[in-house]
Amino acid sequence: MKVYINGKFHDRADARISVFDHGLLYGDGVFEGLRIYHGRVFKLGEHIERLYRSAKAISLDIPMSIEEMQDAVIETVEVNGKEDGYIRLVVTRGEGRLGVDPSSCRRATVIIIVSDIQLYPEEYYEKGIAIITASSRRMPSDTLDPRIKSLNYLNNILAKIEAEQAGCLEAVMLNREGFVAECTGDNVFIVRDSELLTPDPCHGALDGITRRFVMELAASAGMRASEAAITRYDLYTADECFLTGTGAEIMPVIRIDGRTIGSGKPGRITRMLTERFRRVISEQHGLTV
Ligand code: PXG
């Protein structure tokens, strides 16, 4: 494995950054998680655009152009010879003095890791998963805009711990007002009367790239897909529920807080969208299904 750090490739064991990096000291930075399907990076442009917007929102200068970043990602994939896998792109404020003041950080640290993807076992896609509502709330959107994919994941981690303690793989997080925001590393969708609904970013959802893609797939299938204020009542009484994310793709949810969702099996629309999702990826990335 070769890890890209600030323009150079390092062996895994030598891939290190300073303990004075503000990414470590304060979670001061942004990141992206991307997927490689059959040697090609999925939605590379959209991920890089979100990375640069996240950086801009926190006043972090990325010391390379968007084109240079795209080339660096592609080069790192090639150097690692990965046909299918995961890319973690991290940009931190860089090395500085102890102290919150970021002005001592002269240059952002850019890290690109190419690795294997931790996939959910196929049986979960067939049977669906059970989730819980976490008591840890999503950060209010007026405190930290959820569209910023920052290195501050502590409340998501607390929610994930709650899920694990309850024997579940994921937890849905509410915002301060009690509206559904998203899961700890996935967006959430419900199907109601053949219509797709998902929380608005202003309720605490990341503007997920898989989320956008699934909304496009739904529209191309003639379905309505909209952003809405969603409560736990809406989750419990939904016809179908599923999660979306770079790692999970589309994951059916069949139980929430002990209540069975719909028929208790992955729903018709969830399965239809999964099929379309996989088909588009196969076509775009030259795979045979
Ligand atoms: N919400 C949150 C909080 C996320 O972190 C998503 C939604 C889904 O967004 P995308 O753009 O992926 O459809 C995410 C994505 C990881 C990892 O290694 C995390 C994500 C994606 C890939 C890997 O923890 N989070």
Image: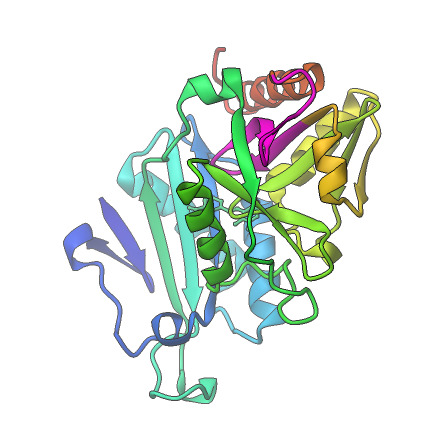
- Residue 17 position by quadrant: bottom left
The answer to whether residue 68 is above or below residue 104 is above
Left or right? Give the position of 8 relative to 221.
Answer: left
Magenta residue span: 241-264
Picture residue at 60% right of the left edge, 55% below the top:
50
Q: Position of residue 195 (x, y in %)?
A: 82, 27
Q: Closer to the camera, 117 or 44?
A: 117
Is residue 73 placed above or below 98 in the rendered structure? above
Q: Nearer the viewer, residue 287 or 122?
A: 122
Magenta segment main secondary structure: strand
Q: Quadrant of the N terminus?
A: top left
Q: Position of residue 39 (x, y in %)?
A: 40, 30
Give the answer, above or below, for where 256 lies relative to 23.
above
Residue plotted at (75% across, 39% down)? 233
x then y, percent, for residue 182: 62, 47
Residue 170 is a magenta residue? no
In depth, the one of 162 and 9 nearer the eye is 162
Within the image, what quadrant is residue 242 found in?
top right
Asked whether, in this view, residue 175 is left or right of residue 63, the answer is right
